[in-house]
Image (tube, rainbow, N blue to C red):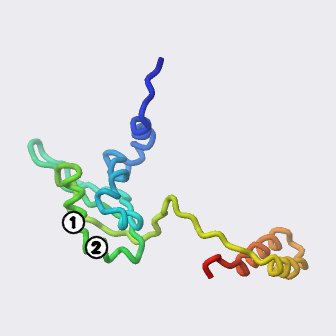
Amino acid sequence: MARVKPLAELIEGCIGPAFAAQGFASTDILAAWPEIVGERLARYCRPSKLEWPKRRRRDGEAPESGTLVVRVEGVFAIELQHLAPVVIQRINRHYGWACVSRIVLQQDRVGRSGTQAKPTRVDPVRAVEVQKAVAGIADDGLRAALDRLGTAAVATRPDR
């Protein structure tokens, strides 16, 4: 009977090559990222790749440190920039050697897993008004798109 394998053993073989192409030796940095930078900051930034120096090291020479490229939401870029020395220190402590010497920030949207948009509420009377407004449009695709747009425009969030 085959032994049940932990998911971590299977994941590394599947996505390991993709991470290697980005300079990561393993997927560990993504899993440990909230521990390294803290839960709050981890929601707004993610490591994207690790760039290693181009020159080859000689025998007996210590490996050179790399540059970690981090995608960060715009409003948290300044905070991460100020915390960069601390983050570098934490990354190096996590791996047990000075693997990162610098962090480069790349402003970008960072997907937040587990968060969903608040549900919207559409007043039935306003929805009928939207349907009447787009009823005269002959093109089915355009009419459907305008109907969705109109419905979204008249929708309200519960907290408003």
Residue at image point 18% right, 49% down: 96
Q: Percent position (x, y) of residue 13?
A: 41, 37
Residue at image point 39% right, 69% down: 72
**How many neighbours does mark 1 have within 10 angstroms: few (below 14), some (14-19), or many (20 or more)?**
some
* Quadrant where the C terminus is found in the figure: bottom right
Give above or below for 143 relative to 101: below
Give above or below for 90 relative to 26: below
Whole-angstrom CA distance, mark 2 to mark 1, is 10 Å
Give the image quarter of residue 146: bottom right
In-front residue for pair 89/104:
89
Q: Percent position (x, y) of residue 95?
A: 22, 49
In-front residue for pair 30/129:
129
Is label 2 in contact with label 1 (beta carbons under 8 Å)? no
Give the image quarter of residue 34: bottom left
**How many neighbours does mark 2 have within 10 angstroms: few (below 14), some (14-19), or many (20 or more)?**
some
Of badges 2 and 1, the one in the foreground is 1
- For disc 1, the marked residue is 86
In-front residue for pair 103/54:
103
Element class at badge 1: helix
Give the image quarter of residue 59: top left
Element class at badge 2: helix
Q: Mark 2 or mark 1, which has the lower sequence index? A: 2
Q: Is residue 31 left or right of 62 when viewed as pictured?
A: right
- The number of callouts visible is 2
User: Label 1 is placed on what type of residue?
Assistant: Val
- For disc 2, the marked residue is 81
Q: Is residue 40 left or right of 157 when viewed as pictured?
A: left
User: Label 2 is placed on what type of residue?
Assistant: Gln
Give above or below for 22 relative to 119: above
